[in-house]
Image: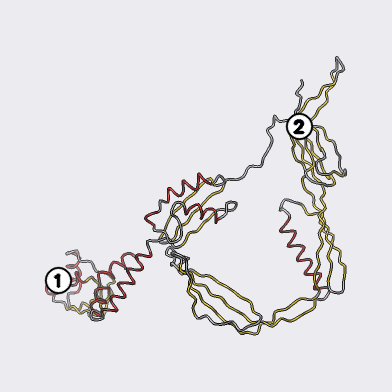
Amino acid sequence: MFLKAWTFLRGYVAVEVTGSSVERFLNMTAHRGIYIWDINPIKNGIQMHCSIKAFKMLKTSAQKTKCRLKVSDRQGLPFIIYRYRRRKFLMGGVAFFVLFLYIMASFIWRIDIEGNERVPTEAILQFSETYNLRIGASKRHINNREVSRAILSHFTDIGWVDVHTRGTRTTIIVSEIIPEHPRLPRDTPCNIVAAQDGLITKIVTASGIPKVRQNDVVQEGDILVSGELPIVSEHTGQSTTVFVHAYAEVWAKMYTPFRFKLPMSYTHKAFTGNERTHHTIQWLAGQQRSINLFHGRISFTNYDKIVSHNQPGSSGDYPMPFIWTQAIYREFIPETRHRTLEEAKAMADRIITDRIIREFDFHIDIVDKLVQFEELPDNLVVSVLITTNERIDKAVPIENPLHEN
């Protein structure tokens, strides 16, 4: 790519070489170190490409080998300038456009954040602005290494940062630290208590004295496994208490009820096919002003608005300093429709499934799902009871333990 750009800037010609000593001409050209490319055979000779300077050097070789040279095509910037040399305004406009692109390429027009989950993207972007890394900033005023070190020291949840700039795009790649679950030290005496209400299904004790059994109903805060161990001396018969770090895995059934109403009638959007499209150009530099193009009054009473944003060049290394926004207004006629009982139950099942996926962690075992329907004139009342099996054990330190041996 660089070679093509360089030959275009210098200019090059397509030359046809004919005669009886074309092979000798090529050997002499190679011996003199003249660079030619794209050599193709033609009738009674060859066709090739060379630079303007090389073409002048080829004349000596052609005279010695009695070959004829014919320029079949001219390409490159020097020929374009010569062709339009009398059109000063056009050449000035082209020069201004090239200069404008060169100047715009020296600024940052897009910043991407990759790898963050817990740390908000907005927080990283806002902090980066204190080190001149922002949209519209000059690349020569940005020190990527300094920004990387600052982000790494400011955000405690980030363990590795890489900031690199290519073209007009800067990418910040972060790697977050895996959070550690808070655990009590092994030498800290504690009890195992219930984190939530539930019905005990399984208890596995490693240390401590179990206070509950399977099928017991417990409430939040009840002691499941005690860290107090009473010890009776065989010699004296006196009882002493030893406090230990209790540990156990306790599983229990949890019951989560919820209830919602599903209307039997709903509004359906019947689209007419009539659309209006508005375009807006948002300039990213300075005050980020917007320019409205081809706007008119929306005469639709009911419509859906679909907005799409596109930054030209955003998929490459040279995003442009503006965003093209397209807003499509689609007219529709609202129609009132009624659900059948089967359609309402199917929709209720989808709502329940979405809520289970959204509110329950993946490691929780869904044991049962009890759904009851109550038909009303205008609504379908849905009552749901979700039964889960999950761990409810939680370690709580024992206050002021007296260690006795």
Quick one: 150 or 42, which is closer to the camera?
A: 150
Element on which disc 1 rests: helix
- Residue 89: x and y in percent read 28, 79
- Residue 108: x and y in percent read 42, 60
Element on which disc 2 rests: loop
- Marks 1 and 2: which is nearer the front? 2
Q: In which quarter of the image is residue 107?
A: bottom left
Q: Is residue 299 visible from the viewing direction of this image?
A: yes
- Above or below, comparing residue 219 to residue 306 in the picture: above
Where, quadrant-wise, is the N terminus in this rendering? bottom left
Which residue is tagged 1? 61
- Residue 352: x and y in percent read 77, 63
Quick one: 60 or 266, which is closer to the camera?
A: 266
- Indicate the colouring scheme: secondary structure
- In this rendering, position of residue 273 left or right of residue 153: right
Label 2 neighbour load within 10 Å: few <14, some 14-19, many 20+ = some
Label 1 neighbour load within 10 Å: few <14, some 14-19, many 20+ = some
**Residue 32: assigned label:** none
Identify the mark nearer the N-term, 1 or 2: 1
- Residue 9: x and y in percent read 27, 69
User: Which residue corresponds to the image point at 49% horizontal and 78% vertical from the top-left?
Assistant: 293
Q: Is residue 46 visible from the viewing direction of this image?
A: no
